[in-house]
Amino acid sequence: MAEVRSPRILEVNWGRILVEGAPQPYRDARLYPGGSAEWDWRETDTHHIPGIQPADVQPLLEKGARVVILATGNYQQLQVCPETRLLLEKQGIEVHILPTPEAVKLYNRLVGKKAVGALIHTTC
């Protein structure tokens, strides 16, 4: 069976991310092998502190991501909960936690090479 490719990020601006195959730009994005979706923080009650929660990354894992990139914002204001790091480590997932511009570059470099997923925060 052929591996499903993650969509490329076409453009990122403050508060807006355009993703290959998406019908419209997102504010923040959840990207995974085979597709993308709006990353709505209200679904998991996520806040800048304590940050990205296990429930935020779970959909990426369910879609087959083996590499996960977590974008902490342009000014690195979004944190990552220790429980999230532990979950990814326990499952043997390669994880990269980077400011948004670097996260986008790495994500696009890995598309088509690895089963990559990402949470991209487009503002602070």
Image (cartoon, rainbow, N blue to C red):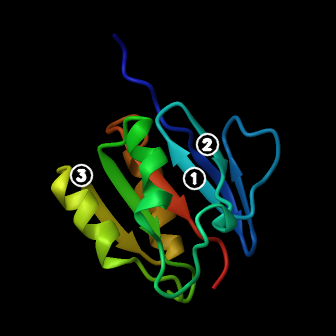
Q: Position of residue 111 (x, y in %)?
A: 43, 41
From the viewer's perspective, is 31 left or right of 63?
right
The image quadrant that residue 27 belongs to is bottom right
Q: How many marks?
A: 3
Instruction: Label 2, secondary structure: give it.
Output: strand
Count neighbours of disc 1 (C-alpha within 10 A) and say few if under 14, some if 14 to 19, many if 20 or more.
Answer: many
Residue beneath label 2, please? 36
Which residue is drawn at the image coordinates 52% and 73% (left, top)? 100
Mark 2 closeness class: few <14, some 14–19, many ≥20 residues within 10 Å = many
- Amino acid tagged 3: Ile
Q: Residue sitting at 64 percent across and 67 percent down? A: 41
Q: Residue at x 55, y 89 (%)?
A: 75
Residue under circle 3?
A: 93
Secondary structure at numbered mark 1: strand
Residue 50 percent coordinates (x, y): 46, 85
Question: Residue furthest toward the top?
Answer: 1
Residue 109 vertical placement versus 124 (above, below): above
In percent of width and height, residue 58 lies at 43, 50
**Which residue has dot 1 on it?**
30
Left/right placement of residue 61 relative to residue 88 reads right
- Asked whether the beta carbons under mark 2 and mark 1 sit within 8 Å of each other, the answer is yes
What's under tag 2, amino acid-wise? Answer: Ser
- Determine whether 12 is above or below 21 in the image: below
